[in-house]
Amino acid sequence: MRAVVQRINHGKVVVNDEITGAIDRGLLVYLGVQEGDTLQDVKYMVDKLTNLRIFEDQEEKMNLSLMDVGGKILAVSQFTLLGDCRKGRRPNFTEAAKPDIADSLYKEFIKGCQELGVEVATGVFQAHMYVHSINDGPVTIMVDSKKCF
């Protein structure tokens, strides 16, 4: 499971001219589910992202987590994070999980965050989405449950 995480002051997802999810202070999480991912990967991501210390404390040091600041998550499913561009010019998406598995694990990620008391807004799985965000910092972190980087 792979995520690109951005610290934001505001974010929203628009599908068919309707806002499907919006948050203020928190994390925009683009989440890609990889072939072979399991609930263990989901648990890793839930724990890692909700406790990732990328919010500033009173001394302006990144020392606080989403849980510490009472932030929210805007979760956007994005299979393109698994695109392999090492060969040729067209990304290869064979490492991305099949849609039914990806949707199931994406929903488990959302549920896991909510069970911790984090408010989660979402996009629409497999829809064409417009994602708007006001990045704070900017702070952008990549996380992979397989610890590839």
Image (tube, grey):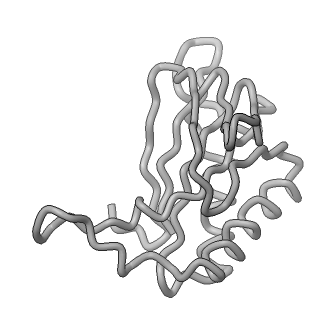
Instruction: Say which residue appears at 56% left-offset and 31% top-offset.
Output: 7
Question: Residue placed farthest to the bottom in the image?
Answer: 36
Depth order, front residue of 123/108: 123
Q: Is residue 34 above or below residue 141?
A: below
Instruction: Say which residue appears at 84% left-offset and 43% top-offset.
Output: 119
Percent coordinates x, y for residue 132 in the rendering:
58, 29
Instruction: Say which residue appears at 54% left-offset and 82% top-offset.
Output: 98
Percent coordinates x, y for residue 123 in the rendering:
69, 49
Percent coordinates x, y for residue 71 in the rendering:
76, 33
Hey, which quadrant is residue 130 in on the image?
top right
Q: Is residue 103 above or below residue 120?
A: below
Question: Residue placed farthest to the top in the image?
Answer: 59
Please give left or right for residue 83 compared with residue 131 in the image. left
Depth order, front residue of 52/105: 105
Question: Residue placed farthest to the left in the image?
Answer: 88
Instruction: Say which residue appears at 67% left-offset and 66% top-offset.
Output: 106
Please give left or right for residue 116 compared with residue 42 in the image. right
Q: Is residue 114 above or below residue 137?
A: below
Hey, which quadrant is residue 48 in on the image?
bottom right
Where, quadrant-wise, is the C terminus in this rendering? bottom left
Please give left or right for residue 121 compared with residue 86 in the image. right
Percent coordinates x, y for residue 58 in the rendering:
64, 12
